Image (cartoon, grey):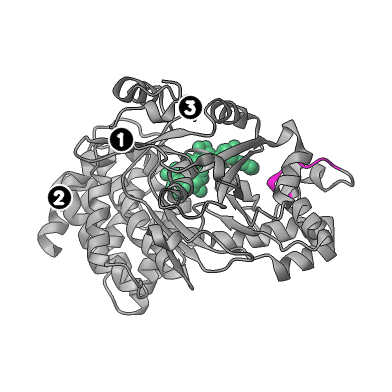
């Protein structure tokens, strides 16, 4: 059955479909960057509300700005905005739901004026974004808005037709201001620490380059709430499309698959209301920071803890490594002994349960996440996720033995040769430099951590250097598995 409003109720009982009247919905949100994650996360939460007869004036109009979004436009238009969200449970169960909260989709270049007017419409009270980390146009060296970007420069020219999200949002806000309409809230749902603050800084910087007075108005009137978002959503494959067709008889050009777990912690900071998200499990809080730290230092740092050890031990898929009790014990020990002591109180979260759920999520064989993906871009990850844990524990007189071993596993991995002598493809913007340094470790075992840009002054602290040295020596002498076993015997 081709997914459409007319056909959706003919689908069998195994598929949950929108039980609400979609023709009565009105748009309250314009979302830029409708991809897999948005459809597995924000659109799903809204759909849950709509099933309860709530948030009917908060339906989503998608907005695509890149050429590749033509495919999403065509898929959603042909299906009245409907699509199938498929949860893949660890026991192999597959749970499909047809989501109905996206009622419209605009592809910017088709008619930029229409898209701007949509955003300027007083009914629209939130513009949300999942435009990837790169979508914020941050200069990686200065941390400032990158005014050298060509598209940005074109958008800054007088009378230019907008192409970037910055230009669309700025122009829509200008019209609202001039018409006396309350501004919308700009809600970033990208995986960036302090995503609201980053969005604020970048959108205001663009506006300032265009019109300083407007920039001032945006600074004082437009809220940019922070949020922590979580749900592993891999890219949709042809197998996923085939699965939806064969198992459930749904002809869907672009279904979404994801893990069952979902989390959203959102800062209470809105210009003109918001859907009652807290009624469907979203935590709306004053301060997102403790939740972000929890995610970065438990989830993301644990990914690093399993990545290099797992790869060196011969695993290639995340769930295979995490189903190995030795690895599961190592991750839990890192989280309990070193990650957790650096967290602030996290209201409403049972940390013990959170940590066990993480191991379960990582062990889900249906998600098929790869260790190679987790091993990539380490030089952006270890310094952001693990080094702060080490520093805080050192400052507080806490333990760093397991974190030191994780850093050592990266140093060993960066040599670019695995334990069987096979080459490893090190994917990192600093790959060349890292590999060159790592290969001098047989002469100078601290070479890798002498890089102060990455590790600060850890190399000066004997409490870190001691366990780092012994883990690295053990990795060279005994390999990853035995190193973990020895840590296990000594510590866990
Ligand atoms: P995706 O590729 O399916 O969708 C990304 C969308 O963003 C596309 O519509 C693309 O056109 C648009 N986009 C990219 N760069 C843009 C730009 N410069 N300007 C305007 N639009 C732009 O990816 P996804 O899986 O939906 O993930 C998107 C983001 O969501 C991630 O980068 C991350 O920040 C966040 N996220 C993803 C996951 C996940 O597991 N996939 C989990 C948590 C958070």
Q: Give percent across and percent down for residue 339.
A: 31, 66
Q: Is residue 420 above or below residue 437?
A: above
Task: Name the chief secondary structure element in magenta.
Answer: loop
Q: Which mark is residue 82?
A: none
Q: Give percent across and percent down for residue 346.
A: 35, 71
Q: Give percent across and percent down for residue 318.
A: 28, 41
Measured Cα–Cα span from mark 1 to mark 2: 20 Å
Q: Which residue is mark 2?
A: 326
Q: Is residue 131 above or below residue 334?
A: above
Q: Quadrant of residue 295?
A: bottom left
**Residue at image point 40% right, 30% down:** 9
Q: Which mark is residue 6?
A: 3
Residue 480 is left or right of residue 223, and the answer is left
Are there few (<14), some (14-19), or many (20+) residues within 10 Å of tag 2? some
- Front-lying residue, 442 or 74: 74
Q: Which residue is mark 1?
A: 368
- Front-lying residue, 373 or 172: 172
- Front-lying residue, 170 or 84: 84
Circle nearer the viewer, 2 or 3: 3
């Amino acid at each position: 059955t081709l997914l459409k409003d007319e056909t959706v109720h003919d689908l069998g009982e195994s598929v949950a479909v929108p039980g609400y009247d979609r023709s009565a919905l009105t748009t309250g949100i314009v979302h830029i960057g409708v991809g897999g994650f948005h459809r597995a996360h924000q659109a799903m939460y809204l759909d849950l509300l709509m099933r309860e007869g709530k948030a009917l004036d908060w339906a989503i109009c998608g907005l695509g700005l890149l050429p590749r979004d033509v495919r999403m436009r065509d898929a959603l238009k042909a299906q009245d905005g409907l699509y199938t969200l498929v949860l893949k449970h660890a026991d192999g169960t597959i749970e499909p739901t047809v989501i109905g909260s996206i009622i419209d989709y605009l592809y910017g270049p088709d008619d930029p004026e229409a898209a701007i007017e949509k955003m300027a419409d007083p009914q629209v009270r939130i513009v949300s974004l999942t435009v990837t980390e790169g979508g914020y146009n941050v200069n990686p060296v200065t941390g400032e808005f990158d005014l050298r970007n060509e598209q940005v420069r074109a958008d800054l020219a007088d009378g230019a037709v907008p192409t970037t999200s910055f230009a669309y949002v700025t122009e829509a806000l200008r019209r609202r201001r001039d018409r006396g309409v309350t501004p919308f809230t700009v809600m970033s749902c990208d995986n960036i620490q302090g995503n609201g603050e980053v969005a604020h800084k970048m959108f205001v910087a663009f506006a300032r380059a265009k019109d300083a007075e407007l920039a001032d108005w945006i600074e004082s009137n437009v809220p940019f709430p922070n949020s922590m978002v979580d749900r592993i959503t891999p890219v949709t494959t042809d197998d996923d499309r085939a699965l939806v067709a064969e198992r459930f008889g749904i002809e869907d050009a672009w279904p979404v698959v994801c893990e069952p777990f979902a989390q959203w912690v959102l800062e209470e900071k809105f210009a003109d209301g918001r859907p009652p998200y807290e009624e469907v499990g979203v935590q709306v809080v004053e301060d997102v920071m403790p939740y972000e730290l929890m995610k970065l230092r438990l989830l993301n740092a644990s990914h690093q803890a399993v990545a290099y050890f797992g790869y060196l031990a011969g695993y290639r898929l995340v769930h295979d490594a995490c189903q190995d009790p030795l690895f599961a014990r190592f991750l839990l020990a890192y989280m309990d002994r070193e990650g957790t002591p650096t967290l602030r109180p996290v209201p409403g979260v049972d940390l013990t349960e959170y940590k066990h759920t993480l191991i379960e999520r990582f062990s889900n064989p249906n998600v098929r996440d790869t260790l190679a993906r987790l091993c990539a871009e380490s030089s952006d990850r270890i310094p952001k996720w693990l080094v702060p844990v080490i520093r805080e524990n050192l400052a507080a007189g806490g333990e760093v033995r397991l974190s030191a071993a994780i850093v050592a596993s990266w140093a060993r991995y960066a040599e670019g040769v695995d334990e069987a002598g096979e080459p490893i493809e090190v994917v990192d913007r600093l790959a060349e430099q890292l590999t060159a340094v790592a290969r001098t470790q047989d002469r100078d075992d601290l070479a890798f951590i002498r890089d102060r840009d990455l590790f600060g002054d850890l190399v000066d602290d004997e409490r870190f250097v001691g366990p780092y040295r012994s883990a690295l020596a053990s990795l060279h002498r005994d390999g990853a598995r035995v190193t973990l076993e020895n840590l296990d015997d000594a510590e866990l």
